[in-house]
Image: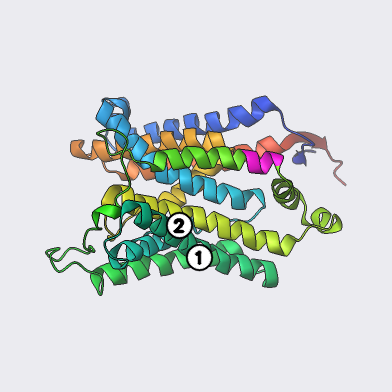
Amino acid sequence: MLRLRLIKREQDSLFARVSVPILSIVLAFLFGWVFLALSGFDPGETYLRMYRGAFGSSYAVSETMVKAIPLALCGLGVSLAFRIKLWNIGAEGQFYMGAFAASGAALFAGDLSAWLLLPLMFIAGFAAGGIWGFIPGALKAYWNVNETITTLMLNYVAILWVSFLVFGPWKDPASMGFPLTPRFPAGGYLPTLGTSRVHMGLLIALLLAVIFFIVLQYTRWGYEVRVIGESQEAALYAGMDVTKNIILVMIISGGIAGAAGMIEVSGITHRLQQGISPGYGYTAIIVAWLARLNPFAILLVAFLFGALLVGGFGIQTFGIPFSIVLILQGAVLFFLLAGEIFLNNRIVVMREEVR
């Protein structure tokens, strides 16, 4: 009797590491093609309109970059946690908490200059996101509480907290009933690059990717993070402080997502509002995995997913629902995880005797 078994590979090839993410995207778009056809839409025309919506003009490209900035920052944040085998699903909540804290600093710190207010907002956003990462990190480090569950549940707490504020005590009396805070003072506006809406957050994301690469590849702490991610037992045997590193990584991971929230409210909306994120924190998980946790690849994948978001908004004017974008994102993740199985394992045909 023949049976198929998965045998773990000792190492994977560079070709496989590159081809699996690319193949995942291709299969996801093929899946989307079939779904669109079955739904009565023209798949080719839909994809063409999405492409034009994301890249058809200089304005479209700038809007794609605007969407890519929070995706890149949140992707970098969760990638750090993933390297140490901590499944931080809470970037969405950490993003919201960062936006909340930065907005509080902008609204109640007084009419400060940008040189004082922007750093204050950044620190507040990073600190709030870091606290939201510290909570599941400490629970994991000291009591081995599943961080997937705690980070996911804290997302709902953060989102509902922001909703409470914009519908209640922070609501702008002049908002005509919309859940918005008053606009920030001029000192709370992040500078833009040129005449587009692309702001300084782009440079922050680029700088952070470089810092990540250097720290993780060439510092002792980066080495400890990689060793702990491979084997906590080996790290403990080598005298590394696993508990401290788990908490520190979760603080930094959450802090970066919180900083992304600060950059979004300071660079784009200039106020806190309901639905400040269309799911950046969740999409960042796919971005990080598709980039295989490489900081520079995360920037590229974030740009591609930013294009997917902008293109998805554009096709709505033609009567095509935005949900196709969510389906494509889910399909990419599905095929990526399936590919990971074959990347890390090989299929072996074994003959077993039937007794």
Q: Give the vertical position of 89 relative to 83 (above or below).
A: below
Spot occupied by residue 62 in the image (x, y as percentages of width and height): 31, 33
Magenta includes 217? yes
Residue 51 visible in the shown view = no
Q: Which residue is mark 2?
A: 258
Seen at 19% across and 66% down, the residue is: 172
Instruction: Report the number of numbered marks.
Output: 2
The front one of 24 and 146 is 146
Amino acid at pointer 1: Trp
Spot occupied by residue 95 in the image (x, y as percentages of width and height): 43, 57
Left or right? Give the position of 171 relative to 153: left
Residues tagged 1 and 2 counted as in contact (Cβ below 8 A): yes
Q: Residues within 10 Å of mark 2 (few under 14, many from 20)?
A: many
Q: Which residue is mark 1?
A: 132
Amino acid at pointer 2: Gly
Q: State the mark number for residue 353.
A: none
Spot occupied by residue 37 in the image (x, y as percentages of width and height): 33, 32
The part of the chain drawn in magenta is 214-218
